[in-house]
Image: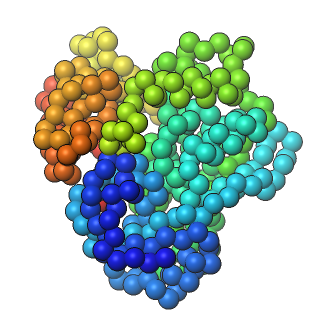
Amino acid sequence: MIRTNFSLLQYNTFGIDETAQQFFSFSSIDELVDFLTNGFQKDEPFFVLGGGSNVLLTKPFAGTIIHPENKGISIVEDADNEIFVKVAAGEIWDDFVLWAVEHNLHGVENLSFIPGCVGASPVQNIGAYGSEAKDSIYQVECMSVADANLRVFTNEECKFGYRDSVFKHEEAGKYIVINVIFKLLKQAPFNLGYGSLQGIDPTTATLQSVRDAIIEIRKSKLPDPKEIGSAGSFFKNPIVPNAQAELLKRKYPNMVTYPASEGFTKIAAGWLIDSLGLKGFSIGGAQVHPKQALVLTNKGNATSSDVVSLAQHIQQQVFNTYQIAISPEVIYL
């Protein structure tokens, strides 16, 4: 379905009311093919918007918003301990996690209660509590914007990084994710080494108990976007060379850090912001969440300019104190 001058208020969890020049939603692959071959102006900008849980709308979008509404979760192959599951891009991410847990399949339980749609998971390489989508993604089925042909990306071809993938770089704007194929496991050790999960006994843990614990942790720290507008974690955790991290730890012993790739350390952006006393700090209608410094919220009347100004203020304060540049995880559109 194609609509013009369409309000995106219900399609972004920050609750910013901007419009799209054109809005197209599809519930089947045939609808998408027909749109790309007949109704789509390829010289105009477009953006694929799922749940809008990682986006800040900064102005009216002068182009086409493409919104996936295709549904479906199906097992495509059962190979001993490995189960390959195809999930439509329009499925709600947490509905898929619940499905996996209910089918006793390991791999995505640590990603419970993350808002958004499945189609965004490979683009953003979503992650939480020591797990990332890339750990379970086997293939990504995409449709070419140029000719509506199908292309399948392997996990390796996706070039996953920290909140990053090939779809943000050399393949940006060229493909629309239509399905994601996950490799889940019937038996696997639980990943309980990250933060609050360390209190869970691995000898008695179940998929459901791990999911329940993560949901409770997230509810205790993060606002419900249905009640308070936000985009979840606003900033990426910065990654710095080990030598820099060691110097910072000597000066700030309580700094929260995690191992990253070889030779590098990840620093908790939430700790950096919290250490500066910025919880509850606000500019206009935008506020640093009083319980979780990594989350910026819309108190009810925030403009996108308020949010951007608040984010820039935080970035400057962190850099002034720690000489660390933190960057938004949220996409400015």
Horizontal side of 318 relative to 120 (left or right) equals: left
**Side of 46 where 247 appears, left or right:** left
Asked whether residue 71 is in view, the answer is yes
- Above or below residue 284? Residue 76 is below
Q: Is residue 289 above or below residue 84?
A: above
Query: How many marks are shown on the rendered structure?
Result: 0
**Residue 225: which quarter of the image?**
top left
Where 139 falls versus 36 (above or below)? above
What residue do we see at 55% from left, 76% from top?
A: 32
- Residue 219 appears in which quarter of the rendering? top left
Q: Residue at x 51, y 81 (%)?
A: 35
Residue extending furthest bottom? 38
Q: Which quadrant of the rendered structure holds the C terminus?
A: bottom left
Asked whether the viewer can see residue 329, the reply is: no
The foreground one among 192 and 307 is 307
At x 27% / y 25%, what residue is drawn?
290
Picture coordinates of residue 232, whole percent (x, y): 38, 39
Q: Residue 147 at x, y = what percent?
A: 54, 83
Q: Nearer the viewer, residue 285 or 320?
A: 285
Residue 167, how many percent across, how many down? 47, 60
Q: Identify which residue is drawn at 52% across, 37% down.
A: 113
Q: What coloring was used for the rendering?
A: rainbow
Where's residue 194, x and y in %? 51, 22
Horizontal arrangement in the rendering, residue 263 relative to residue 56 (left or right): right
